[in-house]
Amino acid sequence: MAKRKKRKGSLKALCLFLVIVIVVGYMASVVSDYSGGKSRGAMKQVTVPAGASTADVARVLQEAGLVRHPVWFRLFSKLGSHDGKYMQGTFSLAKHDGYQDIFETLEKPPVPQDVVKVTIPEGFELRQIADRLVEAGLVTREAFYNEVENGRFDYAFLRGVPKRENRLEGYLFPDTYQFSLSEGAYSIINKMLARFDEIYTQEYRTRAKSLGMTDDEIITLASVIEREAQGDGDRKTVAGVFHNRLKNAQYPYLESCATVQYILKERKPVLSVADTKIDSPYNTYQNPGLPAGPIASPGQKSIEAALYPEAHNYLFFVMDSTGKHRFAETFSEHQKNMSK
């Protein structure tokens, strides 16, 4: 009898455990659906009919394979006060979009079908921007570079840009854009320049002058900061190092690996000695001061870091084994940091 009771108790415990596993697994899938996947899946088009209720929308999304649990979608829609806000029309959604992404998309007027959404990340070089636009089917590489080199764009910030290869490097502002398939390279580039013009305000121009720098020098420095900094945590500290170098007679070389990577058109994790000796106006190991021009498209935070750097006495920084920058005021201290 005792053995039978013990067996029944074990069976109940096992059943309870299995129920908990199933419930936890189910709730984990619900949370995953709400937050979305780390990367977006294939795009799908769904049509929301006029007067559709939340239940109708949930059913459309389920049939398209975009929502696994329509009941939970309806609940989150109600809790988030999204009910009654869905627009009618045809929308493009990604397979791994979370509920919040879906809510935001369906509450805005649908994007026309010939419009493509393109995201240009901060730190992209001109060649990478060209690649992304070509991949989206918006331009040919030849048309893009023809406008980069020869297009006439009427912006005050471009009048101070000296003649050089890739003259618009650094000025195609990194952001998410919606471009029509029919608008062409000139219009696309002009929209990105117009966005830069919105961001680079008169306050920034005034600040650049107070630093004794041109707007082009600020954007050049900002592009180096964008490529060297490890995010917001040390962006202004890195900016301070470069400003200190620009003013230091003993260490006038920025010695930025990112500028050599720009020459190589390859983001090598470790440069060779030969790499640092390449003869190029972009090589900050061989030439004092700033490189010949921007090496990427800096975001607003890097532009602000170039304009308002952190005040300190650091002249060196190196990345340690954890991926964190270590800063130093003296070369001997820098050598110690290099061994960490």
Image (cartoon, rainbow, N blue to C red):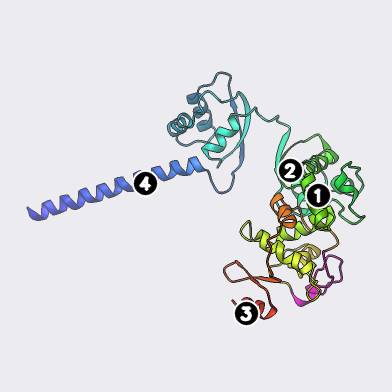
Q: Image point 62% across, 79% down: which residue?
A: 336
Mark 2, Cα crowd under 10 Å, few <14 / some 14-19 / many 20+, is some
Instruction: Point out which mark residue 136 bears.
Output: 2
Instruction: Point out which mark residue 24 bears.
Output: 4
Of mark 4 and mark 2, the one earlier in the sequence is 4
- Give the distance between the C-alpha atoms of the residues marked 1 and 2, in whole angstroms: 38 Å
Please name whichever residue, 222 or 79, is drawn nearer the observer in this view of the structure.
Answer: 222
Read off the residue under disc 3.
336
Residues drawn in magenta: 272-290
Which of the two marks, 4 or 1, is nearer to us in this view? 1
- Contact (CB < 8 A) between labels 4 and 3? no
Read off the residue under disc 1.
206
How many numbered circles are shown? 4
- Contact (CB < 8 A) between labels 4 and 2? no
Which of the two marks, 2 or 3, is nearer to us in this view? 3
Which of the two marks, 1 or 2, is nearer to us in this view? 1
- Give the distance between the C-alpha atoms of the residues marked 4 and 3, in whole angstroms: 49 Å
Which of the two marks, 4 or 2, is nearer to us in this view? 4
Of mark 1 and mark 2, the one earlier in the sequence is 2
Residue 278 inside the magenta-drawn segment: yes
Residue 259: x %, y % from top left: 78, 64
Please name whichever residue, 160 or 314, is drawn nearer the observer in this view of the structure.
Answer: 314
